[in-house]
Image (spheres, helix red, strand yellow):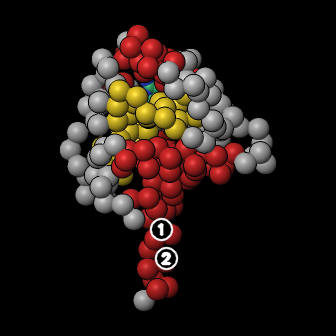
Amino acid sequence: MTASPDRIELISNDITQLRVDAIVNAANRSLLGGGGVDGAIHRAAGPELLAECRTLNGCETGQAKITRGYRLPAHYVVHAVGPIWQGGDRNEPELLAACYRNCLNLAVANNIRTIAFPAISCGVYGYPLDEAARIAVREVRSFLANEDRIETVYLVCFGEAVHDAYRQALQEEAREERRADGTSR
Ligand code: APR
């Protein structure tokens, strides 16, 4: 993967194929695998991934834990547990935002420079795509503004709807940046 001038890149790939330092898994609190991207990552990484996950004693919602990538092209897997959407008044936005921040903090702590995120909580966990994309873009952008040890964050869009939501969120964020620049002059 090549670095991008913008440092946030939208890509439409199967995350298990990406040759980056780390891919993020949208896991559940057991960290013992599941369907969706969790299932795909475990299938591609092989049984050693589950063996290492068993040693981690699970993970709380909003938190993240790191393992090796084993048979994946990525060196590491950062397992994040997103919130299950329950209408939006159970702290879901804060927990989803915390997932992105905690993954990026773990990446810096492990000298990871390129990292790819799936749309955490936007599948089985039912988080509304537009809102989740806005949270992802906002958290990644503000993290990168204060941290130059991460070279590129890839937001992986699996399907058209996810790609549209992320593109929209990036465009909205760019408009807000221009407005803020305009007022700050
Ligand atoms: N590559 C990239 N993205 C993928 C892939 C893949 N191979 N497979 C699925 N996705 C996308 C989905 O389309 C969705 O946009 O990942 C996003 C997250 O969806 P889920 O995998 O369903 O994850 P989530 O909504 O966070 O639910 C987590 O589902 O699989 C179980 O064990 C997991 O219990 C946990 C729950």
Total of numbered circles in the picture?
2
Q: Determine which residue is flagged by label 2.
A: 179
In the picture, the quarter occupied by the C terminus is: bottom left
Residue at the outermost left position: 2
Q: Residue at x 34, y 43 (%)?
A: 110
Q: Whole-percent x and y of residue 44?
A: 37, 16
Whether residue 109 sits left or right of residue 171 in the image: it is left
Front residue (pair 165, 136): 136
User: Tag 2's secondary structure?
Assistant: helix
Q: Secondary structure at mark 1?
A: helix
Residue drawn at the location 46% of the way across and 43% of the way down: 103
**Vertical placement of residue 150 versus 55, above or below:** below
The outermost residue toward the bottom is 185
Identify whether 185 is placed above or below 40.
Answer: below
| Residue drawn at 64 percent across, 37 percent down | 61
Density class for disc 2 (Cα within 10 Å; few <14, some 14-19, many ≥20) is few
What quarter of the picture does the N terminus occupy?
Answer: top left
Q: Is residue 31 above or below residue 97?
A: above
x and y, in percent, of residue 121 in the image: 60, 35
From this viewpoint, is residue 102 visible?
yes
Please state which of residues 25 and 65 is positioned toward the viewer in this rendering.
65
Graded by Cα atoms within 10 Å as few (under 14), some (14 to 19) or many (20 or more), the crowding at tag 1 reads few
Mark 2: which amino acid? Answer: Arg
Residue drawn at (36%, 17%) of the image: 45
* CA gap, disc 2 and disc 1: 6 Å
Residue 3 screen position, x and y as percent: 23, 49
Disc number for residue 175: 1
Q: Amino acid at mark 1?
A: Arg
Residue 123 visible from this viewpoint: no
